[in-house]
Amino acid sequence: MTTVAVIDFETTGLSPAMGDRATEIAIVLLEGDRVVDRYQSLMNAGVRISAFIQAYTGISNEMIATAPPAAQVMDEASRFVGSRPMVAHNASFDRRFWAAELQRLGQAADQPFACTLLLSRRLWPEVRSYRLGSLASYHGLPEAGRAHRAMADAETAAALWGRIRHVLQSRYGLADARHALLMQLQACSRKALPRAIERHLGAVH
């Protein structure tokens, strides 16, 4: 059974290209629907956190001052993930920071990212908001802790990933909704989803 790494970053802003850095990382390893391991750490990248971001995440400059260096944390996180495929909510955001922080260490960031936000848009067009908290409420997912802290968001994204997989399996008769298939589905339009799954089933059989 494929193990995936569900990741969430808290950061000083929206873009590493604008000088923003990670302040916290959490990773949940899922084997099927079962959590088999977790990694979480604050990190000190030497970048000041604005008052707005402090209020948004609850992560203060005082907390970061005593956190381990970003290089140390990212090296540990990279070894923790290994070559496993990755999952995130709004994955383009987390993928940018994953790649930027690892690039500072001279490490590649080759892991493929599946996105629970894109997949949710394909599966539930009736939902008003695709924010992680809104989707958690929509599906009645268990409370994982304070929103906009990395581990709580990673746990919620992991639960949402499980819901997505189960819905695909029951709705379309899939034996297993694997990471590689879900990456294909997130890249197609909502209307094209059934046909993409038919092609997949035809290839399997």
Image (cartoon, helix red, strand yellow):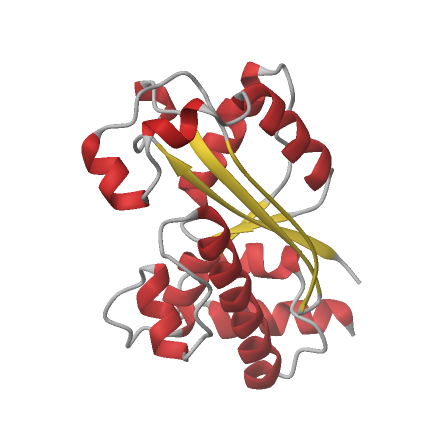
As drawn, 203 above or below 26? below
As drawn, 84 above or below 165? above
Question: Residue 61 in the image: x percent, y percent?
Answer: 33, 27
Q: Is any atom of residue 98 visible in this view? A: yes
- Residue plotted at (27% across, 37% down): 54
Quadrant of the rendered image containing residue 19: top left
As drawn, 16 above or below 111? above
Residue lying at the far left of the rendered structure? 52
Which quadrant would the N terminus be assigned to in this image?
bottom right
- Residue plotted at (52% across, 24% down): 101
Question: Residue 169 in the image: x percent, y percent?
Answer: 62, 79
Between 130 and 66, the one nearer to me in the picture: 66
Which quadrant would the C terminus be assigned to in this image?
bottom right
Quadrant of the rendered image containing residue 125: bottom left
Q: Is any atom of residue 187 visible in this view? A: no
Q: Is 186 left, or right, of 190 in this rendering?
A: right
Question: Residue 160 in the image: x percent, y percent?
Answer: 49, 67
Question: Residue 12 in the image: x percent, y percent?
Answer: 32, 30
